[in-house]
Image: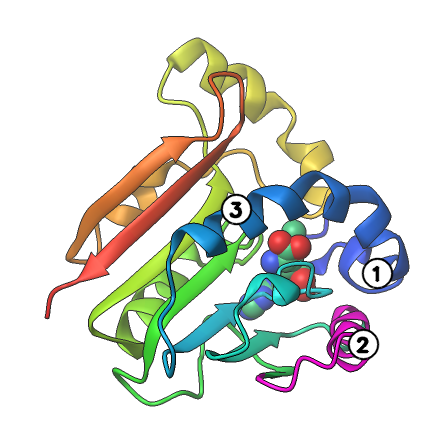
């Protein structure tokens, strides 16, 4: 059985992504980026940038680097950069588990709907922490397995199917949060019935 990151949604079917998941995710990502109140000259790394649905939400006065291992997804991101003349944004092939960026190099490190896709989410958090500047922020939007045992069990049953679609339903927030010393500045859901959690973490200055 393929692992989530091997899903054909991120390769052969990348051209369907925006119409399928992009529509569901885009407004939430834009609202979260707006809420960050980014300042001129700040630098942002977005890991697992995919087709770049978030990119036009970044203000033109911040420098944004997006990475993703899928050339097919990145092709769509590059089209958006070209069409919208997003001169402050660059994207390239990269792996969240082995970031090439230097330690302490970005003011903000984002991952939207990625941490349940990668094969080693703990390592991904460690890498995001490593490249984030002291005093910088790590911003995550994702669904996590419910801490309610019944709900957690029910969503866990869907895992063999969702793996094909490109994510796991079994990851709990505490599985990834415990390994990195970050201060939680925000952790909430967009609505009571939303599956997705917005998390803003601060690295100690
Ligand atoms: C659900 S999509 C999210 C894309 C984008 N962030 C969004 O919100 O639309 C998951 C993305 O994670 C990427 N991905 C898979 N493995 C990865 C890895 N090891 N490092 C970084 N990104 C990865 C996939 O190629 C895909 O583009």
Q: Position of residue 18 (x, y in %)?
A: 80, 52
- Mark earlier in primary sequence (2, 3): 3
Q: In which quarter of the image is residue 168?
A: top right
Relative vertical location of residue 69 with respect to residue 195 in this rendering, above or below: below
Across and down, in percent, residue 95 comes to 54, 75
Q: Which of marks 1 and 3 is in front?
A: 3
Disc 3: CA contacts within 10 A as few (<14), some (14-19) or many (>=20) = few
Question: Height in image: 30 above or below 52?
Answer: above
Numbered mark located on residue 186 in the image: none
Residue named by callout 2:
75
Disc 3 designates what residue? 31
Q: Are marks 1 and 2 in contact (CB under 8 Å)?
A: yes
Q: Do the residues labelled 2 and 3 touch (CB within 8 Å)?
A: no
Q: Nearer the viewer, mark 1 or mark 2?
A: 2
Q: Residue 14 carries which label?
A: 1
Is label 1's Cβ within 8 Å of ligand 1? Answer: yes
The residues tagged by marks 1 and 3 sit, at their Cα atoms, a distance apart of 24 Å
Main SS, magenta region, reads helix
Q: Can residue 4 be seen in this view?
A: no
Residue sitting at 58 percent across and 65 percent down?
Answer: 48
Mark 2 CB lies closer than 8 A to ligand 1: no
The span picked out in magenta is: 73-88
Q: Is residue 51 magenta?
A: no
Q: Tell me: residue 79, above or below residue 52.
A: below
Marks 2 and 3, Cα distance to the nearest angstrom?
A: 24 Å
| Dot 1 or dot 2, earlier in sequence | 1
Vertically, is 117 above or below 191? Answer: below
Judged by depth in the image, the label closer to the viewer, 2 or 3, is 3
Q: Where is residue 108 in the image (x, y as percent from the top left)?
A: 36, 69
Q: Which of marks 1 and 3 is nearer the N terminus?
A: 1
């Amino acid at each position: 059985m393929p692992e989530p990151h091997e899903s054909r949604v991120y390769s052969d079917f990348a051209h369907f992504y925006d119409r399928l998941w992009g529509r569901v995710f885009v407004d939430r990502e834009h609202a979260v980026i707006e809420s960050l109140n980014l300042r001129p000259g700040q630098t942002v790394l977005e890991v697992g940038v995919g087709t770049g649905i978030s990119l036009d939400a970044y203000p033109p006065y911040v420098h944004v680097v997006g990475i993703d291992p899928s050339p097919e997804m990145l092709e769509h991101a590059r089209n958006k950069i070209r069409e919208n003349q997003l001169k402050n944004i660059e994207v390239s092939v990269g792996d969240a588990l082995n970031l090439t960026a230097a330690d302490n190099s970005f003011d903000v490190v984002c991952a939207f709907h990625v941490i349940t896709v990668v094969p080693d989410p703990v390592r991904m958090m460690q890498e995001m922490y490593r490249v984030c500047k002291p005093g910088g922020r790590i911003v995550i939007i994702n669904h996590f397995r419910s801490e309610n045992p019944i709900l957690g069990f029910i969503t866990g049953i869907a895992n063999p199917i969702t793996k094909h679609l490109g994510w796991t339903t079994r990851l709990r927030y505490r599985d990834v949060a415990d390994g990195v010393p970050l201060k939680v500045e925000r952790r909430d859901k967009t609505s009571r019935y939303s599956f997705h959690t917005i998390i803003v973490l601060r690295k100690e200055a």
